[in-house]
Each structure stands twice: as structure tokens, then as C-alpha cells.
Image (cartoon, helix red, strand yellow):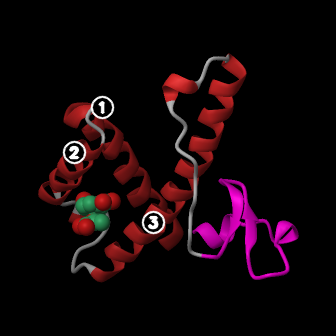
């Protein structure tokens, strides 16, 4: 969860906190990340720095998503891999494809299949 990746040693005195994903301090339960414009990146160093910032935010989102997906498994009558729901997964991919048109539904399906399986696997490991 996002709160868990905030470095308490870097916390401000005003209730805000520094976190590895965000360039600016912010309150708990928030993620703020700049969205660099690829067209503005003209050096390898800057482009890699932009990737690193986006990946830090992705990691925070993936950690948080896995925790929420684990909560869903506990709420469903049949959770875990046995309760996998292809129709729900197709809906997720379709909604994401509308926001990520350059990736499109086929690539997003591969990405989200990996994300969903990793979440279910992590949830099963934490139950064991
Ligand atoms: C979270 C659920 O369980 C499973 C995991 C999903 C996910 O990580 O998004 C989606 C569908 C299910 O295969 C759910 O049914 O909503």
C-alpha cells in the first residue's frame, strides 16, 4: 500500500510526506506524478529519468492494486484462482484500452493478465 512505501525519515513536519514515487510532498492516500511529454525528451538521461519516475509510480499503483484485489478475494464467495472471472477481466481491459489507445486491447490483455495473476499469487502467498 502507498502508505507503506513512504519513507518516514523523509516526512515533513506539516503532515505531508516525501515518497519515492512523487517529486512533491503530499498527504497519505495520494499519488502525484508528473506525466512527461515524450516529445519534450531529447536526451537519453532525461528520457531514462522520466521512465524511472513513471516506474516508481507504477510500482506504488501495482502494490496498492494487489492489496485491493486481495480484499476482493476475501469478499467473494469463491476467491483466488478458483474464482477467476474472465468477463470481469475483459471489462477491465476494455476500460483501460480507452485510456491507452497506443497499447490497444491485445497488448493490454497480456499486461493485465500478468498483473492479475501476480495479484492472485501474492494474495495466496499471504494466506499461506
Ligand atoms: C478482483 C477480482 O478477482 C479476480 C481478479 C481480478 C483483478 O485482479 O482485477 C479480476 C477478476 C478476477 O479474475 C474480481 O472478481 O473482481
Q: In whole angstroms, how far apart are the C-alphas of marks 2 and 3? A: 28 Å
Earlier-in-chain disc, 1 versus 3:
1
Which secondary structure lies at badge 3?
A: helix
User: Which residue is the extreme one toward the top?
Assistant: 43
- Residue 112 is a magenta residue: no
Residue 81 seen in the figure: no
Residue that mark 1 sits on = 103
Apparent side of residue 7 relative to residue 39 in the rendered image (left or right): right
At 53% across and 60% down in the image, what residue appears? 63
Of tags 1 and 3, which is closer to the observer? 1
Of tags 1 and 2, which is closer to the observer? 2
Residue that mark 2 sits on = 98
In the image, which disc is placed on residue 61?
A: none
Position in image of residue 102 (x %, y %): 29, 29
- Residue 5 is a magenta residue: yes
Q: Between residues 90 and 85, which one lies in front from this camera angle?
A: 90
Q: What stretch is highlighted in magenta?
A: 1-28
Q: In whole angstroms, how far apart are the C-alphas of marks 1 and 3? A: 28 Å
Q: Mark 2, residues whose alpha carbon is within 10 Å: few (<14), some, or many (≥20)?
A: few
Position in image of residue 58 (x %, y %): 53, 49
Residue 4 found in image quarter? bottom right
Which secondary structure lies at badge 2?
A: helix
Position in image of residue 80 (x %, y %): 32, 66
Earlier-in-chain disc, 2 versus 3:
2
Asked if 5 appears above or below 45 in the picture, the reply is: below
Residue that mark 3 sits on = 123
Residue 107 seen in the figure: yes
User: Which residue is the extreme one toward the left?
Assistant: 87
At 72% across and 22% down in the image, what residue appears? 45
Q: Mark 3, residues whose alpha carbon is within 10 Å: few (<14), some, or many (≥20)?
A: many
Q: Tell me the quadrant of the picture where the N terminus can be found.
A: bottom right
At 73% across and 75% down in the image, what residue appears? 16
Amino acid at each position: 500500500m502507498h502508505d507503506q512505501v513512504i519513507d518516514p525519515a523523509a516526512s515533513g513536519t506539516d503532515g505531508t510526506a516525501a515518497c519515492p514515487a512523487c517529486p512533491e510532498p503530499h498527504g497519505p492516500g495520494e499519488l502525484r506524478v508528473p506525466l512527461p511529454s515524450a516529445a519534450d525528451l531529447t536526451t537519453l538521461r532525461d528520457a531514462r529519468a522520466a521512465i524511472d519516475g513513471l516506474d516508481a509510480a507504477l510500482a506504488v499503483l501495482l502494490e496498492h492494486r494487489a492489496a485491493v484485489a486481495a480484499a476482493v478475494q476475501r469478499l467473494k464467495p469463491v476467491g483466488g484462482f478458483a474464482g477467476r472471472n474472465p468477463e470481469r477481466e475483459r471489462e477491465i481491459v476494455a476500460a483501460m484500452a480507452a485510456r491507452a489507445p497506443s497499447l490497444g486491447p491485445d497488448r493490454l490483455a497480456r499486461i493485465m493478465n500478468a498483473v492479475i495473476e501476480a495479484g492472485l499469487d501474492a494474495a495466496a502467498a499471504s494466506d499461506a
